[in-house]
Image: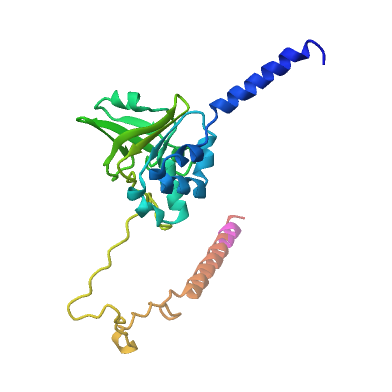
Amino acid sequence: MSPMSSPIVAFLTFFLLLSAADAFNITKILGSFSDYSTFNDLLTQTGVASEINDKNSVTVLVVSNSQISGLSSQPKDTIKKMLSIHVVLDYYDKAKVDKVPSKPLTLTTLYQQSGKAQNQQGFLTMTRVGKQVSFGSAAPGSSHDSIFVKQVTTQPYDISVLEISNVINVAITSSPSYAPNASPPRKALAPGPNKSPLASPPKTTRSDIPAADAPSTTTDSDAPDNTSAASIASASAILFIFASACFMLTMI
């Protein structure tokens, strides 16, 4: 090995060790806290844990086992969606949370990054209400009743794990027929007092139909006698020619 290669190898080794030290594993982090074992298992089952580990700076809003049982019974896609909403793409520890003003702060979540969020579902709002700080979905119709409980653990500026009181409520419509721009369904008209809604329209017989007036036609007898008029015109012309010839003979 040349003398120049030793410093390079040492630098690369130090860089790799530093990178390994900065990396985090959310599964291992939560594995040290039995109160969040269900939340941790769901992160692994849905693949959200791997997405968290790929980030540089995140805040995970965890919920205790006693408060997450309702989410566990949902379809896998719904669980993944909800867990992704509990991952904030920024670093917030207790010191930063304590400084939150009364004006709501908008936070971007992992679900927003998925490209599937609609109607502000990928954003959270963090608001101070008295001495408490609440988290809620920015989606219309969502409640804001998830209260900050405590800081669980942190790796400064890389990952922070905060406990909140309950699963964040998000107004998510998963019905396949959901169409925000669709026109509302038309109301069916109520049938008349003595009419059945399925009754067929009354049939009309030929006798009920009034006879249409026959179009007027012009017969040969009604038309002017064009043949007679032509004969008269021819006779007049012959007489005029004969008279002119006689007049010219008298002049000779």
Residue 55 drawn at (x, y percent): 52, 32
**Residue 47 visible, this orientation:** yes
Q: Which residue lies furthest to the right in this view?
A: 1
Q: In this view, does 115 lie to the left or right of 123?
A: right
**Residue 174 visible, this orientation:** no
For the image, the number of numbered tags is 0
- Residue 217 position by quadrant: bottom left
Q: Is residue 112 left or right of residue 197?
A: right
The C terminus - image quarter: bottom right
Q: In this view, does 157 lie to the left or right of 170?
A: right
| Residue 247: in magenta span | yes
Q: Is residue 47 left or right of residue 105?
A: right
The N terminus - image quarter: top right
Q: Which residue is drawn at 43% across and 80% down?
A: 219
Tell me which segment is drawn in magenta. 245-250
Q: How is the image coloured?
A: rainbow
Residue 82 drawn at (x, y percent): 41, 46
Residue 153 drawn at (x, y percent): 41, 32
State the predominant SS element of the stretch in magenta.
Answer: helix
193 and 163: which one is in front? 163
